[in-house]
Image (cartoon, rainbow, N blue to C red):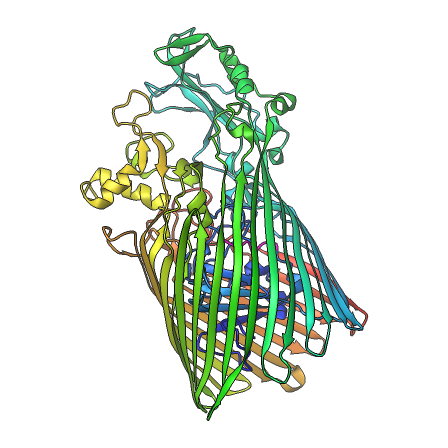
Amino acid sequence: MVTGSRIPRAQQEGPSPVTVISSEEIQNRGYRNVFEALQTQTQNTGMTQGEDYGNTWQPAANALNLRDLGPNHTLVLINGRRVADYPTAYGGSVNFTNLANIPAVMIDRIEILSGGASAIYGSDAIAGVVNIVLKKKFDGVDVNLRAGTTERGGGDNQRLQLVGGGATGDFEGLFGLQVEQRQPVWANQRGFMDSYPDGNNVGYRLNPQSGRYLGDASCAGLGGLFGGNVAPVPGARGGYRCMTDQYYNNYWTLQTKKENYDGYAGGTWHLSDSGKLFADLLFGFDHLQNNTRGPSFTSPDFINASSGDLERWYRLFSPEEIGGKSSNNSKWREVSWTGTLGYSDRVANTSWEYELAATRSEYRSDRTTRYTPAAGILDLYLGRKLGERDGYPVYDPDPARLGRPLSEEEWRSLRRNVTQHSESYSQTYSFTGNGELFDLPAGPVAFAGVLEVGKQGYRIRPDSQYNDGSLYNVSKASSSGGSRDRYAAGGEFSIPLHDTLLASAAGRWDQYRFSGRTEEQTTYNLGLEWRPLTSLLLRGSYGTSFRAPDLNYIYQADANGYYPAQKDYYGCEKGVDGACKNGRVDYVQSGTPDLKSERGRYWSYGFVWSPSSRFDFSADYYHIQIDDLLTTLDPDKLLRDEAACRSGGLDPDSAQCRDTLARVERNAGDASVDPNRLNKVYVNAINAAKERTSGIDLRSNIRWGAGDYGAFSSTLGYTLVLSHDYKQSDDYPSENQRDSLDSHDWRSKLNASLTWDYAQFTSTLFAVRYGSVTNAAGSGRLSPWTVFNASARYRLNERASVGLTVNNLLDQIKEDDSDGWPYYPTGNYDAMGRQWWLDFSYHFGG
């Protein structure tokens, strides 16, 4: 059975294109995991941030973004079944499936259906469906040991894979285990970003009314910190502050530290000639650590009792003070599992087969971060509060305290572990059946049906310390969570109209119940396959799709968070200190149960030409559109628009500007303290947007023999985005996302491979060419980028083999100095450089 249809078929190619990645290709092309195998596919034109992309929302998870429609518009299945969402939302907004903890050792193949498929699979299948198909049978036991590193430093890693299985009597069993450990990669291990020339403040006293620093031209007490790279820098309005160029590069992990213990166990009991009971369990225990910035202290504005002036104090703490940079890491401990129990059989003397199955999936993620108690840090630097004057607290602190480094013991006494617990679950009870209804002159009419009852939910429980006032300068956090019930019924027909013409039709009804509401959607799909020649397939499909509102959009309480690397464009124009750098921007986001389902349409047409078993070529056009799109405003676009509205680039009286300015909160331009300072942005979700995208996909496979020199095979894939338009609401103009400098996604992507099999030796060269993307400054485009991977494997005998894999063969990193540090396009590419692995495999048993 091929993804995109519940009707079994002999031919892989159908009315919609399906890409298949085999387990051998995962190994030979240098893919480290499932995410990399999918991320390099040409249909994945959207940028996402994950565990390899430094400063990111989800350092413990990886998400897919087919057609650049967002991680929530791709349905990810394992063995054709839904799994639990990652417990926390991607970018604080949308729910998605984590691809970082699926054991590669158990994968048989990955199937990618591009385009809408809600008529078959229900909600979420707007951009496409990814079905990760696990191994069903195995004879004996395979062991694989692998070790590797990065050539430029950091990232040492080891992996053990174990897979085995067999049969005895009426029982068949299968198991797999994957254990992986990896060290982090720090920014200061990459020469092109091992300093931060703009500098960061290490310590200062500031009069916030005049903007004058109160220090002199000496940093003697702090000069030994950050490797001795602290120096006085004059302020624009007088005085000095202590600064360093060794902050971000010391505290920023380009790649997480991780330990994964992932496994699988499954069994099938043959109860009769056709009836069988089956059960399986996929599980993961994952530990990760990452860091994006070091700890610091910014005092409240206070009256200095000695001088009578308003002051603000600041200290940035160095690795030397806190016991090493890793002591500031945030830590994730995650447990996930998906279990299925089912029975399948064939109706006697008919073509009809059926299956009853129950699936339960759960995911738990505990994030632990270290924060500073308010009482301890204020007492340390400011001393006892003496009272208030003119609305400001009064202190009489010792300035020498600010200039003295902390000891590790002092620092440890100032820190607390704070843990947020996040959980999600999904459960589905399903009945499916397929068979032949009746015969037409060209062949039998086949039917497949499905009935489903399901439930999914999530819960986020922040540590009570977030809200009890005991932590210093930490946003409050609210508990949130909720669930919804799901009911569905669908049917699919395969109708042979002629020996050369096959039609398909599918329809599905879905109902969601949540928060006292009921949402219903009916979707359909039509497909046509015409084979005028045995070597030629002409195909087309048209369908509707939908996506129920994200649970996070429905149930999220007022969430206070921050974007860790965002520029304040209007503040930069007005000379607000630090606004021109990518810094922290606070946001408020809340959910609402009144959101509607998104509605989509999809169509595609193309051909497949296969004149021989050695060559095939396909070309397909696709078009996807979404109405009532749920959207959370992009903070970068929001702040760019705000600057244009305030500065005259956009009409301040337009609906767009009225909405934009209402979402941005900043101090007045004539405020006595911090004029024009950005306080927060409001980014709640609305059903307003429209999105359209279209493009072409090309695929080719060539296989040929070379006589005594073995055999060769090559693949080629190419996707070109022809259009991508976005409209936030009817009052907003349509935006050309494809060519906009506000977009950081690819307009084209190409991958190609060449494999040589010769006697006991196999080698593969794999390349991915990424199209141009916008630079960090938003002022132009970075040139296309190509990465080469290579692998070689030698079979020592029938049981043993050794292999070498080299990723980023040319050791190149795509640099971008248009907007300063970190000097590379985070999210689009990584900064690993060349990586290599050696592995050894051995097979025991049959």
Residue 288: x %, y % from top left: 62, 44
Q: Is residue 709 magenta?
A: no
Residue 428: x %, y % from top left: 56, 59
Magenta residue span: 96-101
From the viewer's side, name the closer residue of 6 and 255: 6
From the viewer's side, name the closer residue of 399 and 596: 596
Q: Residue at x 44, y 74 (%)?
A: 16
From the viewer's side, name the closer residue of 787 and 329: 329
Q: Is residue 478 above or below residue 81?
A: above
Residue 741: x %, y % from top left: 33, 52
Q: Is residue 642 shown left or right of residue 322?
A: left
From the viewer's side, name the closer residue of 695 and 212: 695
Type of secondary structure dominating the magenta stretch: loop
Q: Is residue 842 shown left or right of residue 810?
A: right
Residue 83 in view, yes or no: no
Name the quarter where the N terminus is drawn.
Answer: bottom right
Q: Is residue 100 magenta?
A: yes
Q: Quadrant of residue 714?
A: bottom right
Q: Is residue 88 shown left or right of residue 67?
A: right
Q: Is residue 435 shown left or right of residue 513?
A: right
The number of callouts visible is 0
Q: Residue at x 53, y 32 (%)?
A: 294
Residue 174 in view, yes or no: yes
Q: Quadrant of residue 37?
A: bottom right
Q: Is residue 308 above or below residue 315?
A: above
Name the quarter where the C terminus is drawn.
Answer: bottom right
